[in-house]
Amino acid sequence: MFKQILNTFLTKVLAGIFNLVIAVVLSNYLGAAGKGIQGLILTTISISVIITGVIGQGGLTYLIPRLNLSVILIPSYIWTFFIAAFIWPLLYVLKIVPDEYIIHVVILSIILAITGINNSILHANKKIENVNLINIIQILITVLVIVFLIVIRHQTTVISYIISLYIGYFAALVISIYLTKGYYYNSKYKFGLKKYLIALKQLLKFGSYNQLDTLAQVLSFRLAYYFLNSFVNITEVGIYSNAVSIIESVWILSRSISFVQHSRLVNSRDKLYISALTLTFIKLTGIIALMSIIVLMLIPSVFYQYVFGNEFGAVRMAIISLSPGVLFFSISFVLSSYFSGTGKHYINTISSISGLVAIILSSLLLIPKYGILGAGFSASFSYLITTLIKGIYFVKQTDFKIKQLLPHKDDFKDFILLIKK
């Protein structure tokens, strides 16, 4: 298990580095406006894939060991193409992505969704290293193509970025098909409408709940992109998206810690151990996140201008406005693992939807007047609300006092022992 945890952590670190390279190249060669369009495209693809996962990735990992593979795969594929056909005209109406890129968003969403289905098959069969390999190859190829087209060939357009996504996504799809072909071949294909209706009901039951939580979270993270584009301009989206990429790197370790925590929680029925472990992880995550955020806040604006270009001096102020929320949400990952690991998924959903409502209301009030700073403070407010709700539930269910959530000097000894273990 430790090998898989380490493999996943290193994968996330490499992905973070590659994403930073993409941000640097696009910012310097396409400018803030081009980087803003890229942010809108990638966010819309992510949201589309989450919706396709309602009957697909959301419940597949849980159902694959329990139902015949073909019975749950066919509804998943049908749903993927149905959602794509629905989203296509909807994007023209919503105007959240420039019209010339909508068809690419739809096709790329389909490719990524199918790869996600294959990843679910691998994940359900405990092939975590294969899933990580697919993810790394996807982003590595994307980076290489971006460097070749934009830096070497000087094709400095958003289309060059889209071409890189096509090649990276398609490479990941091909590899995922190769790694899962055995599962497809060995599956006993059964026909009969009743079997598929039963499977569809199960997919909705286990997928919709999980995806609703994920969708609410992603919208909370990225809804400001659309508000900035609507109320200010696309250049502000580009600057803000770089700040988000940098400050959210703090979450790489938080997510890895919550992954370790979740694997322990689901294998234990000792409530005292579960709550004590969660409390330890809350403090550990909070301390590490705070130190990381302080470092990022101390970096001067000149540095961000040097890395991304002269248009990106405001990145530092955006990072400062996002910092309180990112700190709180680092703890939220640990609390989410606690509730999902103890079977209380509904608490995560309630808190995520509350955070989504918070960012919608605060964005409408702050972004038109304060632009990037308004977006950062709106996100921080949303993250605070989400974490606060989870924290209240946690305190009620564990009988901890609020002051016990704060770190003290004895905790550092526990951290060292925990790391040694």
Image (tube, grey):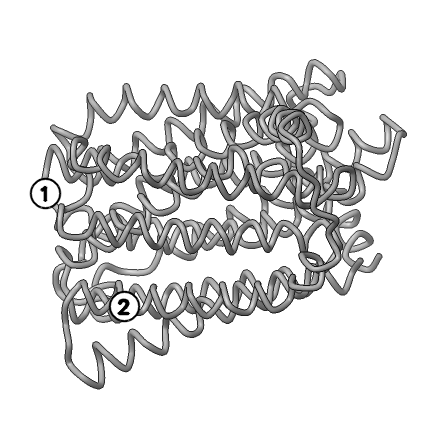
The picture quadrant where one finds residue 215 is: top left
Residue 131, compared with residue 353, is above or below; it is below
Looking at numbered disc 1 in the image, what kind of residue is underneath it?
Asn
The picture quadrant where one finds residue 325 is: top left
Q: Which residue is at 34% across, 49% downward?
A: 244
Looking at numbered disc 2 in the image, what kind of residue is underneath it?
Ile
Q: Give the x, y percent position of residue 225.
A: 24, 40
The circle drawn on residue 159 is none
Q: Is residue 67 left or right of residue 96?
A: right
Q: Which residue is at 41% across, 37% downward?
A: 218
Distance from the alpha carbon under mark 1 to that under mark 2: 25 Å
Q: Which residue is at 30% across, 29% downward?
A: 378
Q: Please tell me which residue lies in front, 290 or 211.
A: 211
For disc 2, the marked residue is 163
**Front label number (1 vs 2):** 2
Q: Is residue 368 left or right of residue 143?
A: left
Looking at this rendering, what residue extends furthest in the front direction? 192
For disc 1, the marked residue is 233
Looking at this rendering, what residue extends furthest in the bottom direction? 152
Q: Which residue is at 80% across, 43% downward?
A: 264
Q: Please tell me which residue lies in front, 294 or 84.
A: 84
The crowd level at tag 2 (other Cα within 10 Å; few <14, some 14-19, many 20+) is: some
Q: Please tell me which residue lies in front, 178 or 299.
A: 178
